């Protein structure tokens, strides 16, 4: 960065020798390279006009940028290394002619013409130097400077090598057909930066770009990669190129940067285009922001009295390049007495090593600090580490040297031994050889093309301010497999001191586990709200776009963060519900057995003999089976049990209802039928009505066969009935068949009810028709109510509902049919005798039917 401090900026009335500076110097050689860099510049503060000289100001200041002086040293190092190499240009020594690049396009062009013509006031289209020694021009790092110089050199077909950064305009061969760019293209820089954003979860990023074609191109590439990775741009500030470091006005948009939620800001450009912005950022102490920059930035600002630096913790993307081993040692040996032609070394020795100038000729006195060396200078003044631009200079010099070497060999081969003359040399003759070397993938120093897009990620440590360390913390390899391109050592990264952990940069607060993102209308995709995961869905990570549904065998916990294994459940004997139903079924079964024993014990009494004793036994035994079949619905289940549930349940009720129907028909035949009494007596004595039971049973078995043959019951599970449980239950298989069986049973009940209703008022002593009709009415109501309730429940409750219906309907048959008889047998035995029957009125008509 430009050194800007009152100690290093002196007016002309300060120290005459320090501010007396030439614009060029020459390091001798057989063939020269013209080097055009800006190391010092003049500027005016308030633009106070001179009294009589036009376009001149009284308040003119000199500013040195000693950071760029490394360019000169890299050039000198490469040339001396080549000159010592006997296998490369053995009979030719290289030199260079340095020209400081002034401000303004007109001054730049004038400096180039002075170099080409050799005159301080250059005559156009003339070369006043007798011997042409310059063979190529080395320009940069500013693309604008290279473009201005290239417009002149293009006319003379003069080779020009630029040290970058790579620029698409300079690659236009129609305008710059003599220009060669040494810097890599950097096509993957935007992808590298976006990969860093994704790695740290930064999705809300600000951009500061130069307002020129480079900024526009980079913004376009960056947008594409951001959209692919769902990273959003918080703001874009295009900085005009006229806003230089000599502008001391406060930048009005700093408030926008400070107030933005974006804590990560990308700065793309070079020192020349945005240097004013960098100086202003350094003065503002924006310590909450993390700056992500490309390597053309010189983040080491000038030292001041503040410990905190705005750029401490910045991350810089720098192209990978080979380390030049001897360069640091070379810098240690550089001094103004070793290179007296150098115009900048005396200034450095004067400023930092207590040297003084001679009052006569401004020559540096040798009475200086002992062991003075550039290595002792602060990093914000001069950095010993080779920069990317210096490496490009080193590479450019070797490219030029190899091309010149090949051209000389070619000329020697073209001349015969007898006619060999001194080699004729014109700069334009280098182009075929430069293009050949420029296009090679592997040159003498093994510069390989695949290195171009590899980046080192450097963390800038500048606490306390002035430390200026650049520590490599990672790499980006675009050709690596996806997911392995970015490599970081996070433990090495120092963030701005305000952060104790990795800083966050997002438009919205992260959606924690259990929530998912929801888009906000009219907002960027990175600005979102958070809503809880619905139903049986979870999110176990932050900022999930969609919740994940748990498998059927799992359920979401209350926080909706994890899927938990569902507990396998069924209507068990140990459950309160299962235990209650089991107890009721056992009690009713025992009660039915007691009733059966009572009937068997009193089988010869009139009340037992009345209404067909055999049918009563059959009904009681069937009711016992009905009560006991409920145990098939409780406890562990399997496919066999599921089939037996329906067969036994339906079969038992079929026999029970058929028995009730036979009882009712028997009463009707005895008192209602108009057949001759002999026929009626035969029907009663032969027990023909008992055949109703096997007939109804056979019809039921046909229905079961069809059911089992088409879609039999099977073991199933219900994962939705009860939260956190998988209910094991029997699936009916065919719902039509199941409802058909229920319809068949209800039709039997309806038939029994009809027969019993017709005989309800018959004058029999123990006529049970009323009780039969009432029991059938209750049975019919139970199962009619069962259907809607059954279909409105799920899981264990559904099974319990079916069990309850079986118990309720069976208990209705037991209680309504047999309770009155048991009452007479146990409580009123006097009514259960022939004497009582004979003494009743109308006893002849009330003769019981014996079986």
Image: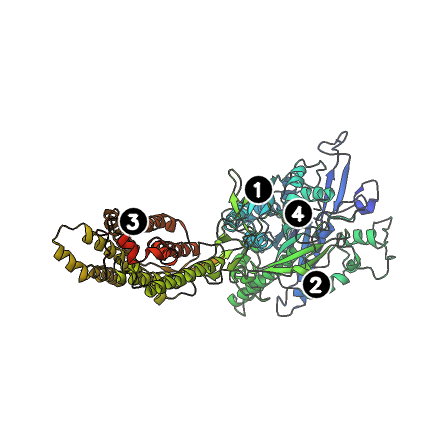
Measuring from the top left, give residue 142's x and y in whole percent: 62, 48
Disc 2 packing (10 Å; few <14; some 14–19; many ≥20): some
Q: Earlier in the sequence, mark 1 or mark 3?
A: 1
Q: CA distance from mark 4 to mark 3?
A: 110 Å
Residue 650 appearing in the image: no
- Asked whether disc 2 touches disc 3, contact meaning CB atoms under 8 Å apart, the reply is no
Q: CA distance from mark 1 to mark 3?
A: 105 Å
| The C terminus lies in quadrant | bottom left
Camera-near label (1 vs 3) is: 3
Rendered position, 742 above or below 205: below
Disc 3 marks which residue?
770
Q: CA distance from mark 2 to mark 3?
A: 120 Å
Q: Is residue 800 left or right of residue 420?
A: left
Camera-near label (4 vs 3) is: 3
- Asked whether disc 1 touches disc 4, contact meaning CB atoms under 8 Å apart, the reply is no
Disc 1 on helix, strand or loop? loop
Disc 2 marks which residue?
327
Rendering quarter of residue 386: bottom right
Q: CA distance from mark 1 to mark 4?
A: 14 Å
Rendered position, 735 above or below 6: below
Disc 4 marks which residue?
271
Measuring from the top left, give residue 264's x and y in whole percent: 63, 47
Q: Which mark is residue 212?
A: 1
Q: For this rendering, which residue is in front, 740 or 65? A: 740
Measuring from the top left, give residue 235's x and y in whole percent: 59, 41
Q: Residue at x 49, y 58 (%)?
A: 576
Residue 413 appearing in the image: yes
Rendering quarter of residue 714: bottom left
């Amino acid at each position: 960065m430009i050194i800007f401090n009152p100690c290093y900026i002196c007016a002309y009335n300060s120290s005459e020798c320090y501010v007396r500076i030439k614009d060029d110097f020459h390091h001798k050689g057989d063939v020269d390279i013209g080097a055009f860099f800006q190391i010092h510049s003049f500027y005016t503060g308030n633009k106070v006009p001179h009294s009589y000289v036009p376009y001149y100001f009284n308040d003119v200041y000199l500013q040195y940028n000693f950071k760029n002086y490394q360019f000169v040293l890299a050039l000198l190092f490469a040339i001396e290394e080549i000159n010592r190499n006997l296998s490369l240009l053995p009979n030719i020594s290289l030199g260079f002619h340095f020209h400081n690049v002034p401000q303004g396009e007109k001054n730049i062009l004038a400096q180039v013409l002075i170099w080409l013509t050799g005159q301080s006031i250059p005559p156009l289209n003339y070369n006043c130097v007798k011997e042409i020694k310059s063979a190529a021009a080395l320009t940069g790092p500013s693309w604008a400077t290279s473009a201005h110089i290239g417009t002149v050199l293009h006319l003379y077909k003069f080779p020009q090598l630029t040290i970058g950064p790579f620029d698409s305009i300079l690659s236009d061969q129609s305008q710059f057909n003599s220009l060669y760019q040494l810097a890599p293209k950097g096509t993957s820089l935007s992808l590298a930066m976006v990969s860093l954003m994704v790695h740290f979860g930064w999705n809300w990023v600000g951009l500061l770009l130069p307002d020129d074609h480079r900024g526009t191109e980079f913004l376009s590439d960056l947008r594409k990669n951001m959209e692919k990775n769902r990273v959003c741009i918080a703001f874009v500030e295009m900085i005009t190129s006229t806003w230089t470091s000599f502008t001391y006005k406060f930048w009005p948009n700093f408030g926008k940067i400070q107030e933005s939620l974006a804590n990560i800001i990308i700065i793309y450009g070079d020192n020349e285009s945005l240097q004013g912005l960098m100086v202003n950022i350094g003065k503002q102490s924006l310590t909450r922001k993390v700056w992500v920059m490309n390597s053309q930035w010189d983040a080491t600002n000038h030292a001041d009295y503040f410990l905190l630096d705005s750029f401490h913790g910045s991350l810089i993307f720098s192209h990978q390049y080979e380390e030049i081993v001897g360069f640091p040692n070379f810098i240690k040996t550089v001094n103004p007495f070793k290179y007296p032609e150098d115009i900048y070394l005396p200034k450095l020795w004067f400023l930092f090593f207590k040297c003084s100038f001679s009052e006569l000729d401004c020559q540096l006195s040798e009475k200086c600090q002992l062991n003075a060396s550039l290595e002792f200078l602060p990093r914000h003044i001069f950095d010993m580490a080779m920069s990317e631009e210096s490496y490009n200079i080193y590479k450019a010099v070797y490219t030029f040297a190899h091309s010149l070497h090949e051209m000389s060999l070619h000329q020697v081969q073209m001349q015969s031994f007898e006619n060999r003359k001194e080699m004729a040399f014109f700069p334009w003759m280098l182009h075929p050889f430069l293009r050949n070397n420029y296009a090679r993938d592997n040159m003498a120093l093994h510069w390989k093309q695949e290195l171009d897009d590899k980046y080192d990620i450097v963390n800038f440590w500048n606490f306390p301010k002035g430390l200026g360390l650049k520590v490599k913390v990672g790499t980006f390899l675009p050709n690596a497999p996806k997911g392995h391109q970015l490599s970081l050592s996070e433990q090495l990264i120092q963030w701005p001191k305000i952060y104790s952990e990795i800083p966050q940069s997002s438009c919205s607060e992260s959606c924690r586990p259990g929530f998912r993102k929801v888009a906000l209308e009219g907002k960027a995709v990175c600005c979102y709200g958070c809503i809880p995961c619905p139903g049986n869905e979870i999110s176990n990570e932050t900022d999930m776009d969609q919740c994940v549904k748990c498998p059927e065998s799992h359920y979401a916990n209350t926080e909706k963060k994890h899927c938990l294994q569902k507990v396998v459940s069924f209507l068990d004997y140990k459950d309160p519900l299962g235990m209650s139903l089991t107890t009721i079924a056992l009690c009713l079964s025992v009660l039915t057995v007691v009733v059966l024993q009572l009937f068997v014990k009193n089988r010869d009494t009139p009340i037992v003999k009345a209404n067909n004793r055999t049918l009563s036994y059959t009904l009681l035994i069937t009711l016992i089976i009905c009560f006991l079949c409920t145990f098939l619905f409780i406890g562990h289940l399997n496919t066999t049990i599921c089939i037996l549930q329906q067969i036994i349940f339906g079969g038992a009720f079929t026999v029970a209802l058929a028995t009730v129907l036979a009882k009712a028909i028997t009463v009707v035949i005895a008192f209602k039928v108009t057949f001759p009494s002999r026929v009626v007596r035969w029907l009663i004595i032969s027990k023909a009505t008992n055949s109703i039971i096997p007939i109804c049973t056979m019809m039921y078995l046909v229905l079961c066969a069809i059911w089992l043959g088409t879609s039999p019951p099977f073991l199933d599970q219900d994962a939705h009935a009860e939260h956190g449980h998988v209910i094991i239950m029997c699936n009916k298989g065919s719902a039509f068949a199941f409802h058909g069986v229920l319809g068949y049973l209800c039709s039997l009940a309806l038939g029994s009810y009809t027969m019993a209703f017709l005989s309800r008022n018959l004058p029999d002593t123990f006529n049970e028709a009323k009780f039969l009709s009432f029991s059938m009415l209750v049975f019919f109501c139970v199962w009619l109510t069962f259907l809607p309730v059954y279909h409105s429940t799920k899981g264990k409750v559904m099974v319990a509902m079916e069990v309850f219906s079986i118990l309720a309907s069976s208990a209705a048959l037991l209680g309504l049919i047999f309770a009155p008889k048991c009452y007479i047998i146990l409580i009123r035995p006097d009514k259960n005798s022939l004497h009582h029957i004979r003494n009743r009125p109308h006893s002849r008509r009330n003769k019981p039917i014996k079986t």
